[in-house]
Amino acid sequence: MGDVQGNASKALDAYRSADESGCDLVAFPELTLTGYPPEDLVLKAGFVADNQTWLEDFAARTGECVAVIGFVDGEDGVLYNAAAICHRGRVVHRYYKNLLPNYSVFDEERYFTPGDDARDAATIYRIGGALVGVTICEDIWSPVGPVAAQARAGASLAVSINASPFHRGRLDERTTMIAERAKATGCSVAYVNQMSGQDELVFDGGSMVVGRDGLVVARSPQFEEHLLFTSIELPEAQPGAHATVVDITNAPRATHSQRDKVSAPVLSDRAQIYGALVVGTRDYVRKNGFTDVVIGLSGGIDSALVAAVAVDALGAQHVHGVSMPSRYSSDGSRSDAAALAANLGIE
């Protein structure tokens, strides 16, 4: 969060891998450059300007592969949750998020101005000869939102960049929604999600590509940073009568390297919950500048689970256990704590 230069550098590394592999298009998550949710950081004019500067730097380094990347656009207090479409050294176009969530953990109406439905919903991009729509997170959740409008404009692929937090059952909810949207619009969907822990939120990744028949074509693993490669056949581009088409590339690239196109298995509920605990712990410690943690070991299940999560998140060398120095700690509790420490390889 807030490490704009670091985020831009990481995105550029992934972009180069995609470009060198012959990809026509690569997409990054919502607000990639700033991190999500940026909250009051976007009220600092210097922070917004910094993210715009690094966007221009990122765009200047793009080549033949088209990139879609999230950032904050705007000035003078009018800000947009935006996606930049970049190609051959420049920002070709900007899309502004239309539907701003303002419920649960989201308060985007406090910071952002919604995009213009009339402009954004009718704008599609010719990439590799196909017509592509771009939307941001909440935009795809509405069955009558921008994705449907872009499909009517002629899009055959909907690219949705997201920062969707994890909760139990969330992956199933997303998959069901995306399948419904694909079948209803006749668009294949490339759904890109953030993977990180930020304060009380965990973003689980799990990006996926879904065909227009609603079936998952490829899926990234949850709780891991991953660059997902896949190929998908799209119908011949036929723009609608009221479409605004931004021409970027008129034909697919001639060569594609043979990258593994593996779809990650879906984790069990327990594995997803445990993965979220590990990511949340790891990112909290690292982002706050800690290196090590100390855990009181009671010999019970609760401290055993906490210690196991910490070891998987940080490595055994960074976890230190303390047997509870209390007259109420039985010999059994102490021996159980010692056995746990030995099993986990911690001091």
Image: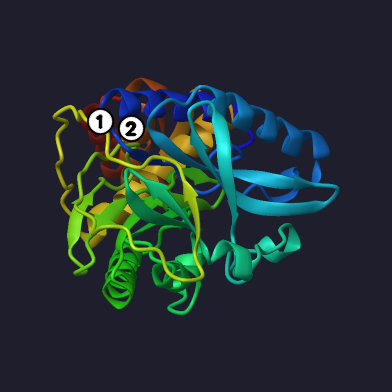
* Residue 210, numbered circle: none
Q: Amino acid at mark 2?
A: Val
- Residue at horizontal 71%, vertical 58%? 112
Residue 66, position as x, y percentages in the image: 42, 37
Q: Amino acid at mark 1?
A: Leu
40 or 146: which is nearer to us?
146
- Residue 107 visible, this angle: yes
- Asked whether the beta carbons under mark 1 and mark 2 sit within 8 Å of each other, the answer is yes
Element type at marker 2? helix
When the figure is inspected, residue 296 is found, relative to residue 305, above or below; the finding is above
Question: Which residue is most to the right?
Answer: 76
- Residue at horizontal 41%, vertical 58%? 166
Query: Could you tell whether 139 is left or right of 309 in the image?
Result: right
Q: Earlier in the sequence, mark 1 or mark 2?
A: 2
- Tell me if mark 1 has few (under 14), some (14-19) or many (20+) residues whose alpha carbon lies within 10 angstroms of its own: some
Disc 2 designates what residue? Answer: 311
Disc 1 designates what residue? Answer: 344
Please tell me in which quadrant of the rendered image residue 262 appears: top left
- Image quarter where the N terminus lies is top right
307 or 65: which is nearer to us?
65
- Residue at horizontal 74%, vertical 62%? 110
Query: Could you tell whether 159 is left or right of 60 in the image?
Result: left
Residue 106, position as x, y percentages in the image: 60, 63
